[in-house]
Image: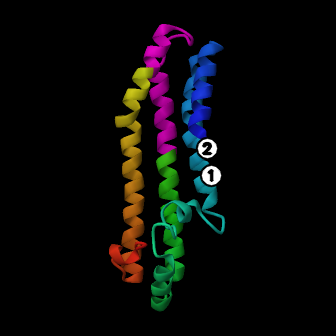
């Protein structure tokens, strides 16, 4: 859904020949809003990290909670889940900042022109190594942190913690 909105906004910026600054704002806004939603969720009963990483679809949540409870580490685990949530939000905030910087650096031609379209293509090409890859590494670090936390606090190996 967000991808479709993003494409429509980019097309609208080009068709309406808006200032390229709006493209940079749009590029930063979507991951920024996702990051904000993830960060806000850290203060709710169900942080988004529970939906994305610590999910019953991926992990044997009941077994992990039981092992944490037996060791008296449930409260510590909740604090670490909040840290993981902030790491996940950080990956989206990184993406937002880098999207803005990259868009303002690369897309300088007036919108609606052939040069503008070529620069959009260059932006897309460079966004993978400069934004997507580092963001994925940050998310992988968050997952590693969560798995290491489960191992340390619950005493379970990854194969024991995963849903079978």
Which residue is found at the position 41% from the left and 80% from the top?
Answer: 153
Work out whether residue 96 or residue 50 is closer to the camera in this orientation and state it: 50
Q: What element carries label 1?
A: helix
* Mark identifier at residue 37: 1
The vertical placement of 66 against 103, above or below, is below
What colour scheme does the image use? rainbow
Q: Quadrant of residue 158?
A: bottom left
Work out whether residue 62 or residue 88 is closer to the camera in this orientation and state it: 62
Residue that protrudes farthest toward the bottom in the picture:
70
Q: Which residue bears the numbered disc 2? A: 33
Answer few, some or many: residues within 10 Å of disc 2's Cα (few below 14, many 20 plus, some between 14 and 19). some
What's drawn in magenta, residue-wise? 93-120
Which residue is found at the position 45% from the left and 71% from the top?
Answer: 59
Which residue is found at the position 62% from the left and 14% from the top?
Answer: 15
Q: In which quadrant is the C terminus drawn?
A: bottom left
Expressed as whole percent of the image width and height from the top left, the position of residue 128 reads 38, 35
- Is 118 covered by the magenta stretch? yes
Q: What element carries label 2?
A: helix
Residue that protrudes farthest toward the front in the picture:
164
Answer few, some or many: residues within 10 Å of disc 1's Cα (few below 14, many 20 plus, some between 14 and 19). some
Which residue is found at the position 59% from the left and 30% from the top?
Answer: 26
Marks 2 and 1, Cα distance to the nearest angstrom?
Answer: 6 Å
- Is 49 covered by the magenta stretch? no
* Mark identifier at residue 138: none
Residues marked 2 and 1 touching at CB (< 8 Å) = yes
Horizontally, residue 17 falls left or right of residue 163, namely right
Expressed as whole percent of the image width and height from the top left, the position of residue 65 reads 50, 81
Q: What is the magenta segment's predominant secondary structure? A: helix
Q: In which quadrant is the N terminus drawn?
A: top right
């Amino acid at each position: 859904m967000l991808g479709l909105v993003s494409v429509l906004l980019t097309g609208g910026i080009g068709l309406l020949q808006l200032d390229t600054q709006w493209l940079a704002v749009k590029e930063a806004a979507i991951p920024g809003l996702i990051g904000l939603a993830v960060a806000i969720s850290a203060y709710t009963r169900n942080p988004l990290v529970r939906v994305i990483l610590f999910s019953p679809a991926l992990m044997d949540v009941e077994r992990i909670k039981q092992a944490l409870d037996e060791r008296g580490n449930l409260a510590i685990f909740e604090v670490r889940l909040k840290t993981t949530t902030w790491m996940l939000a950080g990956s989206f905030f990184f993406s937002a900042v880098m999207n803005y910087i990259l868009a303002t650096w690369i897309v300088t031609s007036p919108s609606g022109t052939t040069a503008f379209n070529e620069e959009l293509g260059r932006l897309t090409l460079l966004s993978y190594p400069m934004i997507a890859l580092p963001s994925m590494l940050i998310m992988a670090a968050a997952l590693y942190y969560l798995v290491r936390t489960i191992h340390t606090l619950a005493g379970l190996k990854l194969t024991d913690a995963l849903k079978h």
